[in-house]
Image (cartoon, coloured by chain):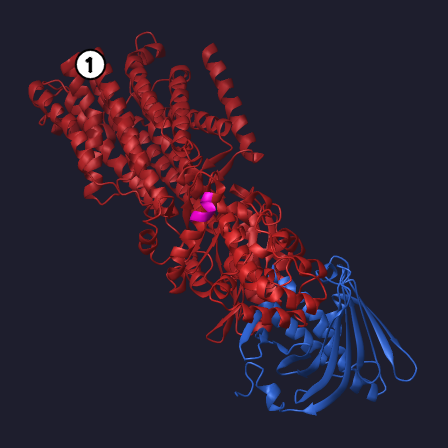
Amino acid sequence: MIRRFLVLIKLCAIVIVGLSTGQRALHAETVKPAPLDQNEYLHGTFELARYLDGFEKPLLSRGEFVISPPNGLIWKTTFPFPGITVLEDDGIFTITPNGDRNAMASGSETRQFVRMISSVLSGNWQTLQSQFNIAENTKKSNTWEAILTPKANGVVATQVNRIAASGDIFVKTVMIEKPSSDQDVITFDDQVVGMLPLPPEFAKLFTDGIPE
Amino acid sequence: MRSAFIWTICLVVMASFSVWQFMTDRTELDADFLSLIGQEQESNQDGVSDIDAVRALLWENGRQAILMLSHPDRDQLEALAEQLKTEISQIDGTENVTLPGQNAGRLDDVRSLYGPYASGMLSDSDRTALANGQADLMYQRTLQQLYSPASSFTSTTLKQDPFLLMPEFLTDLAAKLDPENDIVTKNDRSYLPLIVSLQSDQSGRHSQNWVDQINRIISDAHQNSPELTIFKTGQIFFAVNEAATAKSDVQTIALIATLGIVIMIGLTFFSPLPLIGAIVVVGSGLIAGATAQTAFFGTIHAIALVFGATMIGISIDYALHFLVVPRGETGSDDRFKAIRSGLGLGLLTSVIGFIALGLSPTSLLLQIAIYSIAGLLSAYCSVKFLLPLFPAREVRTNSPIAVIHNNLMVALSYLVVSTRLRLLIAGLLIAALPVTAFLVPGHDDIRALGQSNPTLVSDARTISETLGLGGSPAFIRIDGDSAQQRLETSEAARQAISPLIANGEIQGAIALSDFVPSIARQKANRELVRNNLYQPFASELGEALQISINTPDLEASYLIPNEVGNTLPEVTSLQAGASDIIRLRGVSDSGAVAKILEPFDNARLISPTETISAQFAEYRYWAYVALGSVLLIALFLASLRYGVQKGIRIFSAPAGAILFALLGGTVLGVSISFFTTMAMFLVFAIGADYVLFLSEGNEGEKAAHTQLAVFLSLISSVLAFGLLATSPIPLVSDIGTVIAIGLVGAWFLAFWMTAPTKLTTTTGRAN
């Protein structure tokens, strides 16, 4: 049952990761995303505004993220409280400020999730198309937007009503509307593609990263 | 003639009914041991017996089949598993198929269930952390999860559970419930469990079809991907395999026994007519037996079918007893009159014996008893109504069987001693029987009764060792006056066995109290959460969330077991009547578990195998009592008919036959189980037939005919029952051995106890 927790994680990360790769696609003057190479990583900052039904203000957090195709995703929150979530092949972990590593999820479904990320990174949208109806619209000035609607009767449909993403040379915003009337709005900035190896402060966060 | 016509019509109707029952699947074949026991058990004061709890547990396990797929490439393995899932889902009888990571999500329902009680639901680690003063770490975790992209809370659950305790509780619960259902990699191969839930009405032909389809799919999958290996386990595979083995045994035994009897009759009469007469009698017995079984039972057990085949050996006795009687002065009626008293008394005694058998506490023996009683009554009617229509054929004095019999009688005649001495020996035999029965040790372990397919056993072991799935289940039964008392006991017992889980002596456990903590535990949790988490951190968290956080109310309602059944149907398997059960996986040292539970008055370890074996031991004890009762009735009836002294001699034949069967079986290494004990009822019934035939037809030339008839009966019975001893199924083999020994003993004692001091053979030679 706990595996269903992963659905939202997937959606968020897939959209973040997948659409972030749009930079290279647009450079090539095509709407189709090109994948990060196995020796590349993407680094950027984010702002996550979590609008909860019945709460006066959204839960606002900021931080930075790193995507590395061979390793996974690091979500490092710096405001209002420090915290790190690592999503990789072996599972999903939180890392406490004092360095403790706590497993949030593991197993086949987590692996599937990481595989989905990889599919997106490699420009294979079919993984998402099996679960979403995707409507893409390229606008003038190299901007675009995409609407992802979960297919009926899928597991995703019980957790998400609609996902809207938009950007220019990078993904700029992702909005996730949930059946609970809650809504997450994620804004990305400062994305940069770098060459592996990862900087040590990020590499050490992955299970098979550089030890401290 | 009119009676014969009516009886023929009856047989035709019965045969039509049986065929209709089988053809329309109204009657099916079952080979599952579980169906043999416990159905008739009365509930004890707790509302449910151990055996009922075992039955419920095994029944539930029986609805699950496990396939373990193995391949060097994990991606290919997962793709192949998806294909297999699709194919298996389409088989008639499959309820659903589960692959790792595809467990149907029920998160919303579960959150709705636990949400209102979240402050009382703590994972083991959170409870320990709070008790050890580590609330600050839990608060940090809460903050981290609030802003993590991987957190799953909603506005609703956050209001109910602002410190996000419930996800930890659910993760803990999921780990206890389903820890092994995942892909594992060992020695460069990946292993994937594919779990199939079967529809509840799987039995007989449906099970056979399902297993056939699975085997075909496995074979095709292996052909398409030679590197794919598939192991399988589940009760359905074992049951179908043993049913097929039993069926094959029956066909072989019946064929050989029939051929032997045909040859025997041919060599006695040199005419096909007696053979046809015997077939008519045997056939009518089989028809009536099958009709009775199909009329009374929806499912016939395979072992009952095996016994049905052996009915040939009993019902042919009546035919032979008639056929050896020479043509009378006034026709065929005289022939029946000549044997009527012996045949009638034999039938009466057998029916009494089989009625006692039918009163036994297993449906299997009830099936056999009904089959036997109906079959024998039908055979008697056929002898009376149909055989007189057949032209009489005399026994050829020069036939090989007659010659062998005469020589045997001459040889045996030297063994005949004075009536007084035989009376003394009869007394000794009768006295020795209860003593021997008391002294011979019983072996009631059900694992020794069946013969499982070695490949299936090997597969089951591999799956258990690789994934920790399958294998023999065990459980802890929790009793108590109230549900809350049981939950508290369950929590204490679970705590007590936790060291065994930690060191691997138990691979895992799941209890109702894991899903629904006792109110005492929920209250203690709430207190812990309120004092150690809410009081120091609620206001700080409230500021971060911009909401006011209410401290948990200790007087608010608590979750109780009745509320969870709809959302979590798993809990139904953790209750048995008014008892709760803790299901254990992979118990390697049941002694250690039992010892840890010793201090508990209301918690005890139950191993299904041991429970069923103990049940059969009780049945065996009961069988001895029933057999003793039947013997006493027979002694009483024999004394009434023949006087005390002759009655004791006559009665000693079946009693001594049972004694020989018991001793001979023990010497040959046969397990004296409940089933072999019940087989002695057959020894009694046939032994009583022999001695009664000989007693009632012991005058002049009639004696020689009767002796020959009994000898022919012995050959036919030993052919049928003795062949059972060759069966690869230990249970069937044991029964066959005991009966064969018993019948030879019965034949000798029947002759010896009824022989006049001066014996005359058919050739006129006097002793």
Q: Is residue B401 magenta?
A: no
Q: Chain of mark 1?
A: B
Q: Residue furthest right?
A: A140
Near-viewer residue (B600 or A31) = B600
Residue B422, compared with residue A35, is above or below; it is above
**Picture coordinates of residue B451, whole percent (x, y):** 37, 49
Quadrant assignment for the C terminus of chain B? top left
The kind of secondary structure the magenta stretch mainly shows is helix
Among the 4 quarters of the image, the one containing residue B50? top left
**Picture coordinates of residue B752, whole percent (x, y):** 15, 24
Direction from residue B204 to residue A180 in the image, left or right: right
**Picture coordinates of residue B741, whole percent (x, y):** 23, 36
Name which residue type carries label 1: Ser
Direction from residue B399 to residue B49 in the image, left or right: right
Under circle 1, the secondary element is helix
Magenta part of the chain: B485-489
Chain B tint in image: red
Near-viewer residue (B5 or B223) = B223
Q: Residue at x 41, y 56 (%)?
A: B495
Q: Is residue B420 visible?
A: yes
Q: How many marks?
A: 1
Q: Residue at x 72, y 74 (%)?
A: A14
Residue B30, compared with residue A111, is above or below; it is above
Q: Which residue is mark 1?
A: B639
Chain A tint in image: blue
Quadrant assignment for the N terminus of chain B? top left
Q: Residue at x 52, y 29 (%)?
A: B18
Near-viewer residue (B258 or B520) = B520
